[in-house]
Amino acid sequence: MRENPRAFVHPRRFIAFAAAIAVVFSALTVRLYDLEIVRGDYYHDLSEQNRILRLPVAAERGGITDRRGYVLARNVPGFAVSVIPVDLPRSRETELFQRLGAVLGLPSDAVADTVRTQRQRNPYEPVRISKTPVPREIAFGITERAELFPGVRVDPESIRLYVDGTLYSPVIGYTGPITEDELQKLRDQGYLGDDDIGRTGIESVYERYLRGTYGWREIERDAAQREIKTLALQQPIVGNTVVLTIDDRLQKLLDAELRKGVVEDRFTQAVGIAMNPQNGEILAMVSIPGYDNNMFARGITTSELAALNADDRHPLVNKAVGDQYPAGSTFKMVTGLSALSEGTATRSTTVNVSAMSFSVSGTTFYDWRAHGTLDFVTGFAHSSDIYFYTLAGGTPFAPNVRGVGPEAIAKYGKMLGFGSPTGIDLPNEASGIMPDPEWKLATQDEPWTIGNTYQEAIGQGFVAVTPLQLLNAYASVANGGTLWQPHLLKQVTSPTGAAVPLAQAKPIRKLDMTQENLRLLREAARRVVTIGHAYMPNARLPIAGKTGTAEFGASSGRDSAGRNKLGFHNWFISFVPQADNSDPTAQIAMVIFTYDSSKSLCDNCFNPAVGMSQRILETYLLDTK
């Protein structure tokens, strides 16, 4: 008998199947209960976090102004260019990478790497292509031809603009993108990966004041992570305004005179600094050549940076504080004050400079003329090298005068601020060199000689100073004996206009010198202008000061700008008392330093710094503002 294939299945199979279904549904029920009831709030929060995202909103950087409110750095509208990978068809990738790279001045490979990396990370989020803001014309060009730039997004942001960039770049500096190393250190302070940060100058030193405070916005996203709408917004807070002690009017007067001298080929480079000797405020600071810091704000190209680095005039260095030079005869102030303070010289100490040279141990030391009999004031006024050789180390011209010696000169030189930074609120300040026998033995492994003393006495040899050190030393004499810490910050103003509390300007030290000796030095500095090395015919102000000339480098050839190298540096440090006297009332002191300029070793020779100083001071203090 044949078996029926449709015979009824045994009931136990149905029971097993039903039990399996019951177990599965029970497990699903338990899981749903856990998800919806037990842990519902937890998963709801996760869902909300995925749907709602809080994004940072960048804050504008604070502005920088001069002491009168003239704007030196501000923000102007700019644009960021980004790509949303999901909106870029793969078939048009190569075309876009090449076109966008050409527009932004970037290698197409770099654009491709950025977009492809973001496509793997999150194709729905935009990735920034332009590391710095792009100008309006580029942004508009992209948006007007959107069909040529699929997936490209242009968003408004700000660009740092430096007014008179080349004039102020050595002081203000510039900002630039934060590096990975910096981000690791500053992340806890709220910095993000696409932030700009002060790189040098005032922008760097006062980053804490200039940086704004981020805001935020909450956005809602769909399941594909696309932004739907903004749910909430916290506005960012603009950074503070930094007000400098600089007077833009004086800054431009200084700059115009110095640039004219360069154009006329009287010197190749120059520095000018003016300060208030009564409190250390810097009123002007010019370093030529400078550079346009707007190049860094918009994103400097490799070729532009290479050109700046290859320039033998070093335009990226603020020569007012960052480089050091022989002081020449300006250093005779130190030698003179050392001898006066140690009692080895007085006002009436005389030296009969009856010849132009003398020899010691086979070495000849020169003066620029046979002056005859000089006392302290006339020796300083006519800048006699032999007079100050005598004060420093003794010479045959005045056997009764005991030289003060190199240790004392170094002692008072350091007291006046030489050999150490002034502490000005700028980065990369050089220390200068204030040598003595111990220093020479440690650095040169040689003993000190009388020739070293003579060279030191007139600011040559190992002596090296920054223009700011030299000015600050003379300012301390002009004000009656207080060495102030030079500074550029006058005040900080919040976005609401309130003044931010700041530490008060402070003196570095009081000079351990008598008022009588300081007054004698001021009198001698005034005689430099009325009878001596810096004679100013028809001067309208009681200007006092000291000239200096130092031989330095080659006196032939041309520099990177094609200017003649003349082999000498010229100085003139000046200050202006309130009346034609030696009282410590000067409200302005100034140094001008010209690099690779003419030799100046006689009363009528051309020291370009003298005439420029007279014109600048008279125009600034006397002419209608």
Image (cartoon, grey):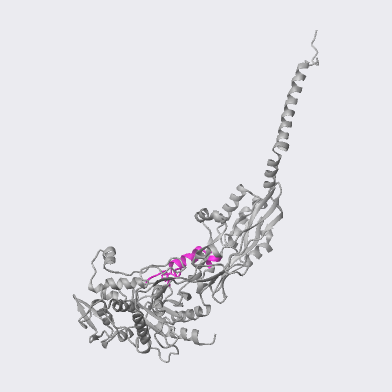
Task: Please report the residue visible at 51 percent of the width from the left and 73 percent of the height from the top.
Answer: 168
Q: Position of residue 417 (x, y in %)?
A: 37, 71
Image position of 15 (left or right of 518):
right
Residue sitting at the far left: 361
Q: Can residue 205 be seen in this view?
A: yes
Residue sitting at the far top: 1
Q: Where is residue 6 in the image (x, y as percent from the top left)?
A: 81, 16
Image position of 117 (left or right of 270):
right
Residue in the foreground of this view, choosing between 170 and 304: 170
Q: Is residue 89 above or below residue 283?
A: above
Task: Please report the residue visible at 75 percent of the width from the left and 25 percent of the height from the top.
Answer: 22
Image position of 541 (left or right of 440):
right
Q: Position of residue 475 (x, y in %)?
A: 41, 77
Q: Is residue 316 magenta?
A: yes
Q: Can residue 555 be seen in this view?
A: no
Q: Does the magenta stretch include residue 520?
A: no
| Residue numbers of the magenta segment | 295-324
Residue in the foreground of this view, choosing between 37 and 224: 37
Q: Where is residue 396 in the image (x, y as percent from the top left)?
A: 20, 81
